[in-house]
């Protein structure tokens, strides 16, 4: 009797467990008792679709000239400073001319000596030629007189070349501005000695116009194929985080740059700077709009 009752209890327990499991499974599959298919709706509107390339770069002036010197000496006078506005042909510095002037005088003296030698050898050759034409002078003496005359002329030409060089060197001691612009760097002080050897020493850096700047951006090789001239660009700088500046791609340079096994290409972006807010050397984060489609239906 007890055995039959135990068996009956087991069967009932199994049925209850099966029913409970079935109910839970049905509840889960039915989506918590609701319809298992859910719909989401969004608003359709007219808008723009864009594809962009991002990069970073450095702001530079469009035309920057480094002014150096072709002669060595002591800086005697400096007439400009940082941020000075200069005109093309304006004197901006002078190198001590005493040594150069002395050299010029020595070369001039050598020139006069060479001229005197030419005059003497010419007269001597003409006399020898008259005697030679009368048959009273040997070929050897005639050739020697002609040789001395030709040699004196060559020495005179060499002295003339040295004179021109000395005059040029003296003129190089006066440093002129090569362009209209602004001095953005002065690398020397009065009394400083500069040595013009293999490398021309830098004295000043002058930029022509800061109202128009350019960004030299490094674009990854994976994106450079989409970048073309005349594409629209927007960029920001850390000094004005809440302001966006506009520009245009003006050049895509072909020479690659490699850094840490990463290849990039330089893209030049031209930008207007009427308020002179942008300054050379600033880091710019740029966005190049490589594709733009306007007034199309989009899902907001």
Image: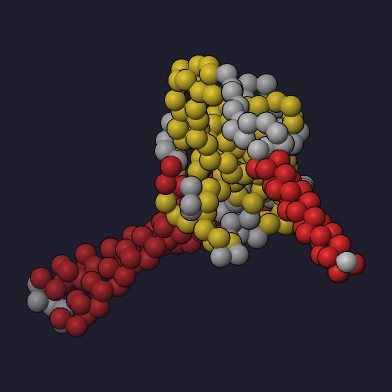
Please provide percent x and percent y for residue 111. Answer: 45, 58
Any part of residue 63 in sight: no
Observer-nearest residue: 215 or 285?
Answer: 285
Q: Nearer the viewer, residue 30 or 287?
A: 30
Q: Residue at x 64, y 51 (%)?
A: 202
> Quadrant where the N terminus lies?
bottom right
Total labels: the figure holds 0
> Taking 185 as reference, is 100 left or right?
left
Where's the C terminus, which quadrant?
top right
Nearer the observer, 215 or 160: 215
Query: Which residue is drawn at the image coordinates 58% and 62% (left, top)?
Result: 259
What residue is at 10 percent from the left and 70 percent from the top? Answer: 133
Q: Residue 245: x and y, percent?
A: 63, 27
Q: From the viewer's perspective, is residue 295 above or below residue 245? A: above
> Residue at left 46%, top 17%?
295
Q: What's the image's color scheme?
A: secondary structure
Compared across the picture, whether 289 is left or right of 3 comes to left
Residue 100 location (% of width, % of height): 61, 54
Q: Is residue 146 visible?
A: yes
The answer to which image quadrant residue 128 occupies is: bottom left
Q: Position of residue 151 (x, y in %)?
A: 31, 70
């Amino acid at each position: 009797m007890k055995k039959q009752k135990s068996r009956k209890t087991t069967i009932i327990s199994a049925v209850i467990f099966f029913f409970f499991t079935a109910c839970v499974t049905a509840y889960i599959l039915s989506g918590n008792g609701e319809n298992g298919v859910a719909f989401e709706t969004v608003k359709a509107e007219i808008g723009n679709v864009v594809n962009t390339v991002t990069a970073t770069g450095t702001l530079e002036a469009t035309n920057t000239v480094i002014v150096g010197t072709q002669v060595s000496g002591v800086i005697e006078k400096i007439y400009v400073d940082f941020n000075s506005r200069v005109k093309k042909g304006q004197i901006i510095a002078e190198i001590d001319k005493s040594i150069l002037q002395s050299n010029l005088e020595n070369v001039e003296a050598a020139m006069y000596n060479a001229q005197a030698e030419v005059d003497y050898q010419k007269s001597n050759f003409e006399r020898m030629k008259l005697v030679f034409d009368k048959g009273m002078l040997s070929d050897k003496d005639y050739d020697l007189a002609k040789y001395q005359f030709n040699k004196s002329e060559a020495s005179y030409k060499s002295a003339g070349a040295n004179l021109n060089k000395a005059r040029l060197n003296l003129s190089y001691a006066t440093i002129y501005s090569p362009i209209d612009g602004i001095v953005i760097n002065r690398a020397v002080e009065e009394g400083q000695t500069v040595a013009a050897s293999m490398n021309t020493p830098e004295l000043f850096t002058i930029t022509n116009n800061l109202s128009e700047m350019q960004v030299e951006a490094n674009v990854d090789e994976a994106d450079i194929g989409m970048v073309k001239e005349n594409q629209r660009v927007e960029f920001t700088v850390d000094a004005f985080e809440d302001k966006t500046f506009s520009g245009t791609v003006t050049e895509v340079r072909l020479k690659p740059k490699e850094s840490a096994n990463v290849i990039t290409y330089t893209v030049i972006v031209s930008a207007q700077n009427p308020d002179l807010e942008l300054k050379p050397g600033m880091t710019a984060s740029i966005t190049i709009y490589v594709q733009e489609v306007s007034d199309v239906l989009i899902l907001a």
